[in-house]
Image: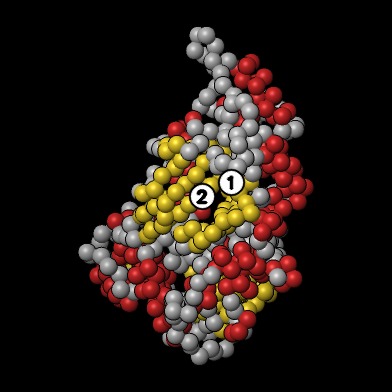
């Protein structure tokens, strides 16, 4: 049954007080608070790793808090399941819409709560009628009978929003909803948000784009390192103040780097472009240098790195290794050229978790551990032992499955695997994502050691302390392009965020 009347706009529909969420080695949320008001948009702001995704999963019943309480209309509630959160009127619209391509639009809107006939069967005619009514209410010109797979991304977002309306949602969470939309589609989404506000929905809007936040939000809440930093009205804050709240911490004593003497150019990238992901990427990497790549979600950093090592092909561009000009068409060609890549998702792309440590480490180096076409187990153990010891891997033995290790030790296995190929350039994509502070320190110490020995490192990271503490130079990307190249006195948290978010100095003042 639909709720009638608008709630008191001065009282939060939903409030979180003192929420704590811990994982092994990580305190993802540390006593945070958040208030969402009817008919208003609250922007949740913070760097990658600030705790935004964890709070969304807590609100939608995927995670349960270890401490603190969730209050709905001032009364404590628990969401033991996603279904329980939905029943309470809380729904989330993610950057990647969680819908079903093979079902119709109407079926997606009402999946899990379809209208029934008196015989208990799904009433398809009523479902179609109500779907049409909801789509019309948000001016979405979509046929409820069409299959979802035949729609574009913007239309899929409208279907996801229609689903939220079909369950009479009181709280609508929008997580990076514009990341894959065109300018016209973004403007249409803004209009839809205005419609939801007029209906009294409380909206949590998560975005890295400051122009969006100031265009659409009434309130803001800032998280940093899993902690609540501050909140207030958008009318009372400037972009510069929000940047300071996001990054306001000392980084001088975090991730200290041993400064290496930089040598001659090892890799030169010229005009790398892709039809949809990045454009005109060019830079030079020197021997013994740690070159940081920073950017917000959708900047194109990982997409470029995957193209550089041959997973995808650029539409144009070349790289130069010494005096050789190369067009890398496959990962095998990249490895042969001396470029290796440690991916962000170590579980799916970096390691075969069911296999033992020694086989993971030696997988790209079978030529070194084989004789006459047969693997030599003694040589495999020898090679694996050499590189895992250098990384201070903690494991009972080298024949235990990688999946049994902690996140930090899994990352060490992946790094060891590629170091065993003796590369000239190693690309580390979010090298310390999801690992505890002790393992982070070990990875960073080893990165510094590698650079001191002359290996060139490209480090993609969303953690500002890591970028500032470890990089000799930083390239900032935004929307598939390089927008800044910074080093020395030009490097600061504020400068990085402003370039990455497209904030001008004048606007931030």
> Residue 182 location, x and y as percent?
73, 50
Looking at the image, which residue is at 51% across and 27% down?
Answer: 112
Looking at the image, which residue is at 59% across and 84% down?
Answer: 488
The image quarter containing residue 128 is top right
Residue closest to the eye, 488 or 334? 488
Residue closest to the eye, 356 or 220? 220
Instruction: Say left or right for 221 vs 501.
Output: left
| Label 2 neighbour load within 10 Å: few <14, some 14-19, many 20+ | many
Which residue corresponds to mark 1?
204
> Residue 466 location, x and y as percent?
49, 72
Task: Point out the image quarter for the N terminus.
Answer: top right
Q: Which comes before the other along the chain, label 1 or label 2?
A: 2
Q: Secondary structure at mark 2?
A: strand
Examine the rendering and report whether any part of residue 193 can be seen.
yes
> Residue 388 location, x and y as percent?
31, 72
Q: How far apart are labels 1 and 2 at the CA level?
A: 10 Å
Whether residue 441 is situated above or below residue 4 in the rendered picture: below
Task: Point out the image quarter for the C terminus.
Answer: bottom right
Mark 1 touches mark 2? (CB < 8 Å): yes
| Label 1 neighbour load within 10 Å: few <14, some 14-19, many 20+ | many
Hey, which residue is sitting farthest right in the picture?
A: 184
Residue closest to the eye, 449 or 461? 461
> Residue 154 location, x and y as percent?
69, 42
Which residue corresponds to mark 2?
34
């Amino acid at each position: 049954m639909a709720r009638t009347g608008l709630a008191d706009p001065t009282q939060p529909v939903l409030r979180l007080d003192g929420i704590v969420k811990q994982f092994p080695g990580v305190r993802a949320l540390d006593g945070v608070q958040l208030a969402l008001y009817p008919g208003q948009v609250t922007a949740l702001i913070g760097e990658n790793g600030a705790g935004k995704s964890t709070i969304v999963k807590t609100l939608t019943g995927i995670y349960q808090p270890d401490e603190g309480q969730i209050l709905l209309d001032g009364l404590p509630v628990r969401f033991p399941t996603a279904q329980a959160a939905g029943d309470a009127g809380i729904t989330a619209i993610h950057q990647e819409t969680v819908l079903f391509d093979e079902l119709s639009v109407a079926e997606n809107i009402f999946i899990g709560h379809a209208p029934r006939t008196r015989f208990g069967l799904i009433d398809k005619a009523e479902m179609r009628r109500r779907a049409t009514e909801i789509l019309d209410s948000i001016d979405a010109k979509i046929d409820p009978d069409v299959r979802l797979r035949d729609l574009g991304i913007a239309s899929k977002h409208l279907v996801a929003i229609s689903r939220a309306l079909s369950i009479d949602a009181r709280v609508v969470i929008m997580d990076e909803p514009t990341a894959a939309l065109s300018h016209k589609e973004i403007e249409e989404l803004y209009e839809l948000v205005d419609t939801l506000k007029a209906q009294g929905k409380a909206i949590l809007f998560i975005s890295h784009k400051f122009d969006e936040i100031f265009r659409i939000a009434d309130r803001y809440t800032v998280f940093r390192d899993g902690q609540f930093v501050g909140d207030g009205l958008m009318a009372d804050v400037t972009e510069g103040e929000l940047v300071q709240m996001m990054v306001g911490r000392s980084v001088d004593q975090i991730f200290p780097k041993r400064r290496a003497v930089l040598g001659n150019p090892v890799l030169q990238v010229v005009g790398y472009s892709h039809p949809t992901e990045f454009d005109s990427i060019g830079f030079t990497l020197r021997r013994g240098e740690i070159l940081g790549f920073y950017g917000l979600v959708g900047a194109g950093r990982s997409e470029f790195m995957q193209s550089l090592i041959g997973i995808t092909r650029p539409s144009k561009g070349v790289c130069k290794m010494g005096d050789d000009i190369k067009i890398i068409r496959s990962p095998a060609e990249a490895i042969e050229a001396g470029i290796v890549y440690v991916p962000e998702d170590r579980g799916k792309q970096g390691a075969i978790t069911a296999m033992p440590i020694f086989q993971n480490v030696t997988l790209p180096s079978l030529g070194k551990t084989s004789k006459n076409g047969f693997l030599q187990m003694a040589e495999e153990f020898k090679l694996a032992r050499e590189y895992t010891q250098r990384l201070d891997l903690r494991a009972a033995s080298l024949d235990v499955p990688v999946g049994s290790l902690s996140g930090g030790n899994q990352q060490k296995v992946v790094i060891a695997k590629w170091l065993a190929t003796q590369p000239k350039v190693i690309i580390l994509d979010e090298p310390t994502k999801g690992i505890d502070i002790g393992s982070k320190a070990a990875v960073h110490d080893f990165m510094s050691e590698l650079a001191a020995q002359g290996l060139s490192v490209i480090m993609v990271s969303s953690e500002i302390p890591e970028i500032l503490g470890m990089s000799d130079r930083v390239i900032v990307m935004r929307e598939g392009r390089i927008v800044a190249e910074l080093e020395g006195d030009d490097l600061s948290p504020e400068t990085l965020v402003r370039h990455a978010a497209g904030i001008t100095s004048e606007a931030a003042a």
